[in-house]
Amino acid sequence: MLQGTPRTRPDGSDRVLGERYDTALLDLDGVVYVGGEAVAHAPSSLAAARDGGMRLAYVTNNAARTPRTVAEHLTRIGVPAADEDVITSAQAVSRLIAEQVAPGAPVLAIGGEGLRAALAEQGLRVVESADDGPAAVVQGFGGPALPWGSLQEAAVAVGRGVPWFASNTDLTIPGERGILPGNGAAVEVVRIATRWMPEPPEPRVAGKPLPPMHRETILRTGARHPLVVGDRLDTDIEGACAGGVDSLLVLTGVTDGAQLLAARPDHRPTYVSRDLRGLLAPAPPVTGEAAAGFTCGGWTASAQGPELRLAAADEAESGDPLDGLRALCAAAWTAAGDGVCTLDAAKSLARLGL
């Protein structure tokens, strides 16, 4: 699918996805683990994909942890990983800064150890105060220990005109007790504090879905034919679209069937799977056209009036519900064109158990 051409259906593949692509660029939370524990089937699926020759790279917008810490966590939950298998938004933003400032320049860093380590890797010097003459200000997720005073320092420095960077601007992150403020929320604090400026500044952002993060993954993995694997439409899938690479959406995280059907063009994945077992199988094709309906497996979907409707090939309805969802995607995305589908799909999704 060419960039700029609205995707109207998920693609099919007669080859196992893990064999078709040389590298999987995997999001972590919601894809490999949830709440610190492995997602069902993730360890075995990733092991099988790796044994089949696919390289596995773990790509995260979370700038708080170092690659080593992330790799150790993955290994503990049954997904063996080395430091070099992990790419973070802290690494992406540190490279972006290093390209804009003098070697060894001081940088006011607001965030955790992952951000500080990434800046050191680029030869940059971390400082703590706006009065230390920083050449740049950078914000990365710092977790619950982030002191309010560090945001004050960032606001003072940005207010003085120091170039401003952010690892990512995700407003929220999932937590074991619910949804928590993400780095984007901390960025908003500095933005609010600098609105008095005649031309209020905006940070240069590196993380998904923006190009610096994709560039960082390619530089570090050497991938020639990568597949982005994620659970979020607005970071993982949009980032793949921006980078011009294929994507696999798994339904083990934040995206549900209704959100997928209503996806705008740059949020529509190449493939859809229930979980990471999708790497180990071909992708069933969606056939048909709007007039007669779109068929995948034993299901046919069509847009009829204000609804998306679904029909089964036999009364038993024993086909894979994911095939029904793929057919519904084709009906929804075709009806929407370069917009967003607003047709009612509640009955069809309930029929699929989605």
Image (cartoon, rainbow, N blue to C red):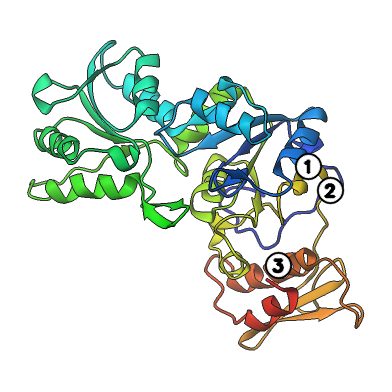
Instruction: Find residue 238 and report its horizontal and vertical position in percent.
Output: 52, 50
Q: Is residue 335 left or right of residue 117?
A: right
Q: Dots 2 and 1: beta carbons under 8 Å?
A: yes
Pick whichever of labels 2 and 1 is earlier in the sequence: 1
Q: Is residue 349 left or right of residue 154?
A: right
Instruction: Find residue 192 and report its horizontal and vertical position in percent.
Output: 16, 51
- Circle 1 is placed at which residue position? 17
Hey, what amino acid is under mark 3?
Ala
- Where residue 320 sits, quadrant-wise, is bottom right
Does residue 99 appear in this view?
no
C-alpha separation, residue under disc 2 versus residue under disc 1: 6 Å
* Mark 1 neighbour class, 10 Å CA radius: few under 14, some 14 to 19, many 20 or more: many
- Circle 3 is placed at which residue position? 330
Instruction: Find residue 289 and report its horizontal and vertical position in percent.
Output: 77, 71
Residue 282 circle label: 2
Hey, what amino acid is under mark 1?
Leu
Pick whichever of labels 2 and 3 is earlier in the sequence: 2
